[in-house]
Image (tube, rainbow, N blue to C red):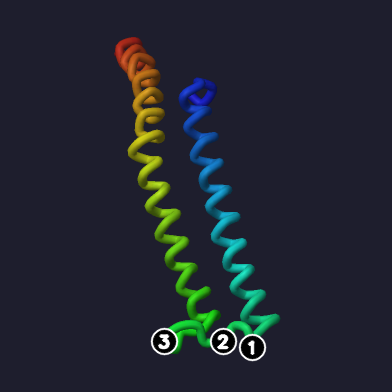
């Protein structure tokens, strides 16, 4: 199964998404830490209704995490599930043949 094209495509696409998402969230977190650590005056600048740049950058971490979660769930239902079904279809005849041969 691991050598089948649908399985390899599923693993590659999921892996690609996870790598991109990890770089995005960690990169944005690094920007947040850099602003807070290297430019505390900028981070403390009030932007809107008592909210500072640092506070808004911190909140944006949650927004980005929620967006990436939503995006993964969308991909899971539109792309990954189709690939999973193809893998299961390929595995089912082999499993049935093995079960019949073992009896």
Q: Quadrant of residue 93?
A: top left
**Picture coordinates of residue 17 (x, y %)?**
52, 44
Q: Mark 1 falls on what kind of element?
A: helix
Q: Residue at x 48, y 27 (%)?
A: 7
Vertical order, 83 against 36 (above or below) = above
The quadrant of the rendering that contains the C terminus is top left
Characterize the local packing of mark 1: few (<14), some (14-19) or many (20 or more) Cα atoms within 10 angstroms.
few
- 56, 81: nearer the viewer: 56
Characterize the local packing of mark 2: few (<14), some (14-19) or many (20 or more) Cα atoms within 10 angstroms.
some
Disc 2/disc 3 C-alpha distance (Å): 11 Å
**Picture coordinates of residue 2 (x, y %)?**
51, 26
Q: Relative to residue 88, is residue 35 drawn left or right? A: right
- 20, 100: nearer the viewer: 20
- 59, 100: nearer the viewer: 59
Vertical order, 1 against 77 (above or below) = above
Q: Which residue is mark 1?
A: 41
**Picture coordinates of residue 25 (x, y %)?**
54, 60
Q: Which residue is mark 3?
A: 49
Q: Residue at x 40, y 25 (%)?
A: 87
Disc 1/disc 2 C-alpha distance (Å): 6 Å
Q: Residue at x 35, y 33 (%)?
A: 81
Marks 1,3: beta carbons within 8 A? no
Vertical order, 13 against 89 (above or below) = below
Disc 1/disc 3 C-alpha distance (Å): 17 Å
Q: Relative to residue 88, is residue 1 drawn left or right? A: right
Vertical order, 52 against 16 (above or below) = below
List the single residue furthest toward the right: 38
Q: Which residue is mark 2?
A: 45
């Amino acid at each position: 199964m691991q050598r089948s094209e649908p399985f390899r495509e599923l693993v590659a696409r999921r892996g690609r998404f996870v790598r991109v998402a990890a770089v995005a969230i960690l990169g944005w977190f690094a920007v947040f830490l850099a602003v807070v650590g290297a430019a505390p005056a900028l981070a403390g600048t009030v932007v809107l209704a008592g909210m500072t740049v640092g506070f808004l950058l911190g909140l944006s971490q949650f927004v980005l995490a929620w967006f990436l979660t939503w995006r993964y769930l969308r991909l899971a239902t539109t792309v990954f599930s189709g690939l999973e079904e193809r893998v299961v279809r390929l595995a089912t005849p082999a499993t049935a043949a093995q079960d019949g041969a073992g009896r």
